[in-house]
Image (cartoon, rainbow, N blue to C red):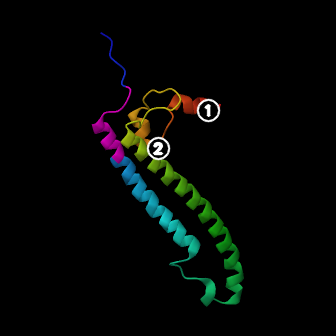
Amino acid sequence: MAEVEKTRYSDEELAEFKAIILDKLEKAKADYDLLRATITHTSSNDTEDTSPTFKVLEEGAATLSKEESGRLAQRQLKFIQHLEAALVRVENKTYGICRETGKLIPKERLKIVPHATLCIEVKENERK
């Protein structure tokens, strides 16, 4: 008799993925908070107490750094949203199912990219 192909991950497997997602989410939020602090200078030594010569040089670098931190913060926020959406899929028991093929995304991929919604084949075809 042929083996029946699984259509979803078991509750135990989903609990395992949920733990991975929650861990990544906690780290992502900490990174996001750090980036926001960098942008808003909540915990930095500003150039206010340095000489005017250094101030001019540092303002340019600070602006560049703020822009980069802003971009990184936006990416981090997007990552957090993807992880939160993955948690919803875990609760709905639809986690790990490719949204194109309807087949299960391999565990190995989900452990590395826990917010994945596409299997490798679809993702590779997308790039072409």
Q: Residue 103 colored magenta?
A: no
Q: For this rendering, which residue is in front, 121 or 12?
A: 12
* Magenta-colored segment: predominant secondary structure: helix
Helix, strand or loop for disc 1: helix
- Which quarter of the rendering shows the C terminus? top right
Which residue is denoted by mark 2 in the rendering?
Answer: 115
Q: Position of residue 38 (x, y in %)?
A: 55, 71
Q: Is residue 2 above or below residue 76?
A: above
Q: Is residue 68 above or below residue 43?
A: above
Q: Amino acid at mark 2?
A: His
Q: Residue at x 63, y 63 (%)?
A: 68
For the residues labelled 1 and 2, say whether their Cβ atoms are less than 8 Å apart. Answer: no
Residue range highlighted in magenta: 7-18
Which residue is denoted by mark 1 in the rendering?
Answer: 126
Q: Residue 13 colored magenta?
A: yes
Q: Residue at x 41, y 52 (%)?
A: 24
Q: Position of residue 80 (x, y in %)?
A: 48, 54
